[in-house]
Image (cartoon, helix red, strand yellow):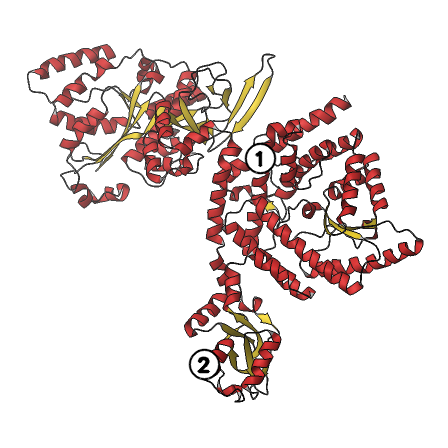
């Protein structure tokens, strides 16, 4: 869907929800696209780099365990300005994922429910371009909750760092080489981080992984600009999930 | 977790290291992370001023300016933990320099607004951005070093590390247990001792009496003094083995409420230790040692006192004394030891046939001695009038100087490896010969002559007829007049050894061998500094010998010192103190002191201060080179 079309649809949605006592944070999210100028420069754009931890990958039965997000102003990471919430999943945590995240069911139960966290989260993302690694999975789970709570999906433009990585490899290796070897390219955030010299620590949670993603995105900034990608619209084209 | 990383990084960055943890956390929450690929211009000359303070987290930058001629003038290379962009942060003007990344570089950024906020709250940080480095941070470096020394070497640790055997008075006076009270009191009076150990026929100590016993058990009770002493002696003899540590001895004294403790080795009496000895160990004062030296009449006794010099340094370091004061006190004590030994030598060999003056030079001459340093001494004697007088003087001073050399070795002053000692006939000569030595070196400045000048021109009289030394000093200052060739050779030697800073402002260390990753602080920093100041002193022909006194004397008469004098004082003070602390630490760890420093073991503040000091040395060397060598050779 083109950006103009998205904005148009967005307007319609806004009008549609106006009469239905829409929640204020949802209304603010609906206005997101209006405040983002796709003609603006990459370095003048506000980004929010996100990551989620999930109970599993099945959209129907699994849920969000935690959400982390880090703010970036252009290529600059705002270190103190981050978002991290652990969600009470309501349903039982799958014991297999505890091993990965270290969040036990008991621990998560003391945390607020997604119904309280999602409004905070979409306000944190207000008027910013969302960036994430393999971000479509995160967005799918966020949208599941969005639809349940507000009836529509999150409105922010979304950039996938994995797509940026593939684009970069394609530019470097040449198109043909890429065509042959695309399935050999890694999709692991940590391997890409290491390739770009971003330190990867032992312990992972949603916010530390969002921070790693932010640093990877930070390394892409000068590369993008060197290759002539200056405007946000071009970034959206390359980094579309 | 993200901000924790920031805190743990910036708490080692000057000037943030002076802030408390919670203040650092507050700063971390406002900090940003920026990435600059290789060859990025962070600041541009004549471009906008910096809008944030940048702390290099990883990578490095070059700071340079371009002169109107187009020539590139490199100011600095900066790496991890160093700052960018603070000069123009608070001024409205344009950036005066280019800052370009030499590799991919990550920086923590603190915005101008936040920096203003920080500066208004913390005068420490404000000072940092408004003063020259050496001046403003020297005191803090001292404080830091002082605190470190307190942790590693308080007097308490001396108590825990010194065996009682080292402290015990040897050759204890003892008597057989069957003598009377009166007899034992007489023995104590005769030997001026406050306690007497009583032994059985096998020389095993069986009891002790003290002044206190005589007072409490005899005089106060009107006891007959003809009674056997065994009736009043303390029989439950409290003993310590020579290998026990002093704190154990102290514990015993406290537990049994006694002031004397016998020290035994294999059951046999070895010595005695008093609570006074332990107090001396904790707070040995330079004054008591100096007084004690005066009261000694044998080389052995002086030698055992001279071992206490390290505990004086301990005391001075604890009191956070400046290096200048530490070396002055040590010099004073060493001077007294030498004088006392010369006294003993005069007694042994009789009155010298001619008036003489004992001079010292090298570090001793400059009053810059720290821990044990080589002997550097010589004898000037009055010109003999007859051949017989000449022969007599030669014979006398030969035996005399050998005795002094050997006695000083026993007191812990090793012989000079270059044989610059009065025991070498070359360095015990009549005043006229001495004057001709000096004149020859100055008139024919060959490399050996320069070497001798460097060592001997820092001479100072410490004993005998000072007018001889004064006459030689006057001769030296007179002989230097108009001797540009000599000064030029001296300048050449002075710029020969460069401070251990690489082109990239990192420390140059040894690449292999015993001192891998270390550099010789004395050879690379102290000596070049002393040489610079000596050159300036010879240029202006001043008579001072100590580096500090020379700098102060030159401040109103020497152009370079007028401009850099203050920084020179700070830099020399720092280098000297670093050396003293380094050697002191080695001694407390039981290793032989040396001058090898591993820069990685210095704190950031020490590193930074040392770099500034090295840069000052380089700058002064460059000025000397320009003045003497470039201009004249081209």
> Which chain is mark 2 on?
B
Which residue is more in the foreground, B499 or B394?
A: B394
Q: Nearer the viewer, mark 2 or mark 1?
A: 2
- Neighbours of disc 1 within 10 Å: few (<14), some (14-19), many (20+): many
Q: Are marks 2 and 1 in contact (CB under 8 Å)?
A: no
What percent of the width, then of the height, locates residue B81? 46, 33
Mark number, residue A42: none
Q: Secondary structure at mark 1?
A: helix
Position above or below: B268 against A126: below
User: At 40% from the left edge and 20% from the top edge, which residue is drawn?
Assistant: B51
> Which chain is mark 1 on?
B
User: At 53% from the left edge and 68% from the top edge, which residue is drawn?
Assistant: B164
Which residue does the numbered mark 1 point to in the structure image?
A: B613
Which residue is more in the foreground, B185 or B324?
A: B185
What percent of the width, then of the height, locates residue B163? 53, 66
> In the shown orientation, is residue B405 left or right of residue B395?
left
Say how many tags the image has: 2
Q: Is residue B409 visible?
A: yes
Mark 2 or mark 1: which comes first in sequence?
2
User: At 66% from the left edge and 39% from the top edge, which residue is drawn?
Assistant: B530
Q: Is residue B507 visible?
A: no
User: At 43% from the left edge and 70% from the top edge, which residue is drawn?
Assistant: B254
- Neighbours of disc 2 within 10 Å: few (<14), some (14-19), many (20+): few
Position above or below: B202 against B251: below
Mark number, residue B220: 2
* Quadrant position of the C terminus of chain B in the picture: top right
Q: Secondary structure at mark 2?
A: loop
* Quadrant position of the N terminus of chain B in the picture: top left
């Amino acid at each position: 869907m083109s950006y103009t079309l998205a904005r148009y649809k967005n307007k319609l949605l806004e009008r549609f929800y106006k009469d239905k006592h829409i929640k204020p944070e949802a209304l603010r999210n609906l206005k997101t696209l209006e405040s983002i100028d796709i003609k603006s420069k990459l370095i003048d754009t506000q980004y929010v780099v996100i990551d989620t931890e999930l109970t599993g990958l099945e959209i129907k039965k699994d849920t969000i365990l935690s959400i982390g997000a880090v703010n970036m102003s252009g290529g600059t990471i705002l270190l103190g300005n981050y978002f991290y919430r652990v969600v009470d999943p309501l349903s039982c945590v799958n014991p297999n994922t505890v091993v990965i995240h270290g969040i036990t069911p008991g621990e998560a139960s003391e945390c607020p429910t997604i119904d309280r966290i999602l409004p905070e989260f979409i306000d944190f993302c207000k008027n910013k371009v969302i960036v994430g690694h393999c971000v479509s999975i995160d967005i799918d789970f966020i949208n599941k909750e969005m639809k349940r709570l507000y009836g529509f999906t999150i409105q922010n433009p979304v950039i996938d760092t994995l797509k940026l990585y593939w684009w970069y490899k394609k530019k470097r290796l040449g198109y043909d080489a890429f065509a042959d070897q695309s399935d050999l390219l890694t999709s692991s955030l940590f391997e890409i981080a290491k390739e770009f010299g971003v330190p990867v620590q032992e312990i992972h949670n949603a916010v530390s992984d969002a921070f790693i993603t932010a640093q990877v995105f930070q390394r892409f900034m000068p590369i993008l600009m060197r290759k002539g990608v200056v405007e946000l619209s071009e970034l959206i084209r390359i980094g579309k999930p | 977790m993200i901000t924790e990383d920031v805190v743990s990084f910036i708490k080692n960055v000057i000037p943030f290291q002076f802030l408390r943890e919670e203040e650092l956390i507050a700063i971390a929450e406002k900090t940003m992370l920026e990435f600059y690929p290789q060859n990025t211009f962070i600041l541009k000359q004549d471009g906008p001023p910096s809008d944030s303070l940048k702390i290099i987290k990883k990578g490095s930058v070059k700071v340079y300016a371009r002169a109107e001629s187009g020539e590139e003038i490199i100011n600095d290379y900066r790496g991890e933990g160093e700052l960018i962009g603070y000069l123009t942060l608070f001024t409205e003007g344009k950036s005066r320099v280019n800052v370009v990344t030499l590799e991919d570089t990550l920086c923590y950024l603190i915005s101008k607004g936040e920096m203003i906020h920080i500066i208004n709250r913390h005068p420490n940080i404000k000072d940092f951005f408004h003063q020259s480095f050496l001046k403003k941070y020297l005191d803090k470096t001292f404080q830091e070093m002082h605190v470190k020394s307190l942790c590693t070497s308080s007097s308490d640790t001396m108590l825990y590390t010194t065996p009682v055997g080292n402290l015990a008075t040897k050759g204890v006076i003892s008597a057989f247990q069957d003598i009377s009270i009166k007899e034992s009191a007489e023995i104590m009076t005769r030997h001026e001792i406050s306690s007497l150990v009583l032994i059985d026929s096998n020389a095993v100590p069986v009891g002790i009496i003290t002044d206190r016993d005589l007072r409490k058990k005899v005089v106060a009770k009107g006891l007959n003094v003809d009674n056997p002493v065994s009736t009043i002696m303390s029989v439950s003899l409290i003993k310590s083995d020579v290998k026990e540590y002093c704190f154990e001895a102290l514990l015993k004294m406290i537990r049994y409420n006694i002031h004397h403790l016998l020290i035994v080795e294999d059951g046999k009496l070895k010595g005695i230790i008093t609570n006074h000895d332990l107090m001396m160990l904790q707070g040995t004062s330079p004054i008591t040692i100096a007084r004690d030296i005066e009261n000694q009449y044998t080389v052995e006794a002086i030698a055992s006192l001279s071992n206490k010099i390290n505990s004086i340094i301990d005391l001075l370091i604890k009191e956070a004394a400046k290096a200048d004061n530490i070396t002055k006190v040590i010099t004073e004590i060493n001077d007294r030891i030498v004088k006392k030994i010369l006294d003993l030598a005069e007694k042994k060999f009789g009155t010298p046939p001619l008036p003489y003056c004992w001079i010292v030079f090298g570090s001793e001459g400059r009053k810059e001695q720290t821990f044990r340093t080589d002997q550097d001494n010589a004898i000037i004697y009055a010109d003999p009038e007859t051949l017989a007088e000449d022969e007599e003087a030669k014979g006398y001073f030969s035996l005399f100087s050998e005795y002094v050399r050997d006695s000083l070795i026993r007191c812990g002053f090793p012989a000079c490896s270059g044989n610059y000692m009065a025991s070498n006939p070359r360095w015990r000569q009549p005043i006229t010969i001495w004057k001709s030595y000096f004149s020859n070196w100055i008139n024919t400045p060959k490399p050996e002559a320069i070497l001798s000048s460097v060592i001997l021109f820092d001479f100072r009289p410490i004993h005998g007829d000072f007018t001889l030394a004064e006459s030689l000093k006057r001769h030296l200052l007179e002989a230097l007049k108009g001797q540009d060739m000599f000064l030029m050779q001296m300048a050449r030697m002075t710029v020969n050894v460069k401070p251990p800073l690489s082109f990239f402002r990192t420390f140059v260390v040894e690449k292999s061998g015993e001192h891998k990753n270390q550099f010789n602080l004395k050879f690379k920093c102290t000596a070049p500094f002393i040489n610079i100041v000596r050159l300036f002193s010879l240029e202006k022909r001043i008579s001072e010998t100590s580096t500090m006194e020379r700098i102060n004397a030159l401040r109103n008469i020497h152009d370079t010192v007028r401009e850099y004098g203050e920084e020179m004082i700070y830099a020399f003070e720092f280098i000297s103190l670093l050396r003293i602390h380094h050697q002191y630490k080695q001694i407390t760890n039981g290793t032989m002191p040396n001058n090898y420093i591993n820069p990685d073991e210095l704190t950031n503040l020490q590193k930074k201060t040392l770099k500034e000091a090295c840069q000052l040395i380089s700058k002064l060397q460059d000025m000397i080179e320009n003045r003497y060598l470039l201009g004249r050779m081209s």
